Amino acid sequence: MGDSSGNFNRDVIKENLNQDGVDRRGFLKCMAWAGTGTLCLIQGGVLKSFALSDVTSRGVAAAKGELSFVQISDSHIGFDKAANPDVTATLDAAIAKINALETPPEFVLHTGDLSHLSKPSEFDTLDQKLKALRTDRIHYVPGEHDVLNDNGEQFRERYGKGSKGDGWYSFDQKGVHFIGLVNVMNLKAGGLGSLGKNQLEFIEDDVKHLKSSTPIVVFAHIPLWSVYPEWGWGTDDGAQALGYLKRFGSVSVLNGHIHQVMQKVEGNVTFHTAMSTAFPQPQPGTAPSPGPMKVPAEKLRGLLGVTDVNFVRGKQTLAVVDSTLAA
Amino acid sequence: MRKTILLAVVCAALAGGLAWAAVSRGHVFARRSNANAIEVKIDNYSFAPGDLTVKAGTTVSWVNHDDVPHTVKANDGSFKSKALDTDDKFTMTFDKPGVYEYYCSVHPRMTAKIVVK
């Protein structure tokens, strides 16, 4: 990392530490430097951001929790256009990155768009590749590219064993409650991502028995918050879903779909989107469309990456580290 | 023997007739498609033209020029294409007058309509 970007990072840290949340300017800056690797620590609803290079000196490494997992997203196996002609190679790089983590993740979340065109051969390739992951298991939710011609039947058959409805489910791990949602089906003309009535009822029912102190992690493909509706980056009934989670002290929402890191804190809820392992997409409004963004070959891996998440009990703390595939 | 020859003659006549019919139908179809065929481009996550008025009997083709798949789906579900990969084409002939609103079911912000007169 050069001097100038180092100064830039410190500038951003100051701004974030002194505020209750992250304003638009703040998080756009955060996005800009996310490519160099960031750690975002959430304590009591306040997002604190550090550059990875600062982590040790600030003692943040001590925040390593008892639950650690990794999020990957948007592998788009089958995509072969200019923005990345070799998406399996970058997926391999992402897997290597995860396998090199000091603490192996207890599980991996894939937040959708495993495939580009829902082809069986694409899912086969992904499965073959992910066998190399050093982790116990992988949890999936579908992206719109995974349910193209069959309303997600194939996806559920492969990845949704034991799930309900269109493929939603929940599970508990070390006292943290995880909810996997599907917001890429039955999309209405002019609308955004959609959960639908049945899934909303599932969420309401699913959290009823939980204590308000239970940390909740919600993961779904399309952002549940309104990132940029003009490009379809949001979920029509996302706010309703989050309404059922109001009484919980710590809610983290992990999404993919937009192929870049963005984060926001709103009350008790922290929103985070992950990078893709395949190709980057433009920042909101900076291009005529959200289509795959072609960057010089040497810059590509700096815009792809994985997300490492650590939970520390008692501190209501979820430490989110985005790191790119750049060497 | 005579029976066989007769059958052969009848077959030849039938085949000739069918061939003639096929040629003339092809001719009519070709003339129609030249006059009444329109292409809608799918580019940069939008349909162009997005608001199209055509005569009844017009054949509309959608061609995807994006690097991501799109679909063409009627808002009322009356027609739907498969996912169209880059350069894939979907074709529909609109025989009945009316307003046909449609969208991309993968990216539902992409909406458009065809008015058939």
Image (cartoon, rainbow, N blue to C red):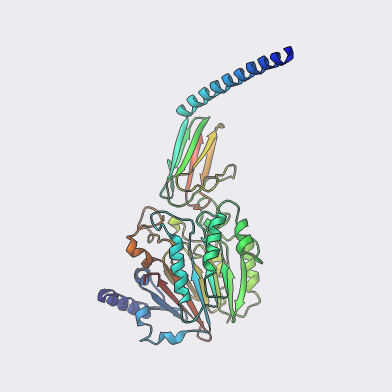
Pick whichever, A213 or A110, lies toward us.
A110
Q: Kindly identify the residue that appears in the image at 47 percent across and 49 percent down.
A: B110
Counting every numbered tag in the picture gives 0
| Residue A121 percent location from the top left of the image | 55, 56
- Residue extending farthest to the top is B2
Q: Kindly identify the residue that appears in the image at 48 percent across and 52 percent down.
A: B109
Q: Residue A41: in sight, yes or no?
A: yes
Pick whichever, B66 or A119, lies toward us.
A119
Image height check: is A192 above or below B100?
below
Q: In which image quadrant can residue A327 be found?
A: bottom left
Q: In which image quadrant can residue A164 be found?
A: bottom right
Q: In which image quadrant can residue A80 be found?
A: bottom left
Q: Residue A166: in sight, yes or no?
A: no
Q: Kindly identify the residue that appears in the image at 42 percent across and 59 percent down.
A: A86
Q: Quadrant of the N terminus of chain A?
A: bottom left
| Residue A209 percent location from the top left of the image | 66, 77
| Residue A313 percent location from the top left of the image | 53, 85
